[in-house]
């Protein structure tokens, strides 16, 4: 018997540092979908907006595939913030010198599933 692994959505190549997005993700992990969306709506971080889009997409995937589901039946099963490639840029400094500026990217993966036992 195969186990339901949930409904997944992935957003890739977002220009945001994974270390700044991860604390936002930890706040909503294992929370009900409606509560997670309310939390993200009220957070000022850029990462909250990015995660909110991906979470909304995962919920939409779940509701499209299973017509019996309702938003209140969903919860955030897993949320993963992976590191993406880095854009390397030149940062000009004083006296003709230059430093390297790394624009970090992240990949956000959200898996939602239906609550068990209800």
Image (tube, helix red, strand yellow):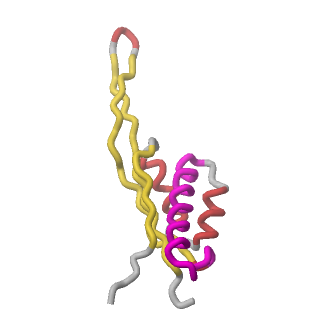
Look at the image and tell me in which quarter the C terminus lies.
bottom right
Look at the image and tell me in which quarter the N terminus lies.
bottom left
Residue 98 located left or right of residue 65: left
Q: In this view, does 28 lie above or below 22?
A: below
Q: What stretch is highlighted in magenta?
A: 45-72
Quadrant for residue 111, please give it.
bottom left
Residue 21 located left or right of residue 85: right
Residue located at (33% from left, 27% from top): 100
In the rendered image, residue 110, in percent from the top left (x then y), is placed at: 46, 63
Quadrant for residue 40, please give it.
bottom right
Farthest residue, direction top:
95
Quadrant for residue 59, please give it.
bottom right
Of residue 24 and residue 75, the one placed in the foreground of this image is 75
Of residue 107 and residue 95, the one placed in the foreground of this image is 107
Magenta span has 56?
A: yes
Magenta span has 48?
A: yes
Number of numbered discs visible in the structure rendering: 0
Of residue 53 and residue 35, the one placed in the foreground of this image is 53
In the rendered image, residue 79, in percent from the top left (x then y), is placed at: 45, 64
Q: Main secondary structure of the magenta part?
A: helix
Q: Is residue 101 above or below residue 11?
A: above
Residue located at (54% from left, 74% from top): 75
In the rendered image, residue 117, in percent from the top left (x then y), is placed at: 53, 90
Residue located at (41% from left, 50% from top): 12
Residue located at (61% from left, 74% from top): 71
In the rendered image, residue 107, in percent from the top left (x then y), is placed at: 40, 52
Q: Is residue 46 above or below residue 75?
A: above
């Amino acid at each position: 018997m195969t186990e339901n692994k949930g409904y997944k959505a992935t957003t890739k190549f977002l220009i945001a540092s994974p270390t700044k997005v991860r604390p936002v993700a930890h706040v909503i992990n294992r929370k009900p979908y409606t509560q997670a969306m309310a939390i993200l709506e009220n957070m000022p971080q850029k990462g909250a907006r990015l995660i909110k889009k991906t979470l909304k997409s995962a919920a939409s995937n779940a509701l499209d595939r299973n017509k019996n589901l309702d938003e209140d039946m969903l919860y955030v099963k897993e949320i993963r913030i992976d590191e993406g490639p880095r854009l390397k840029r030149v940062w000009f400094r004083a006296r003709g010198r230059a430093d390297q500026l790394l624009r970090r990217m992240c990949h956000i993966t959200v898996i939602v599933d239906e609550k068990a036992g209800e």
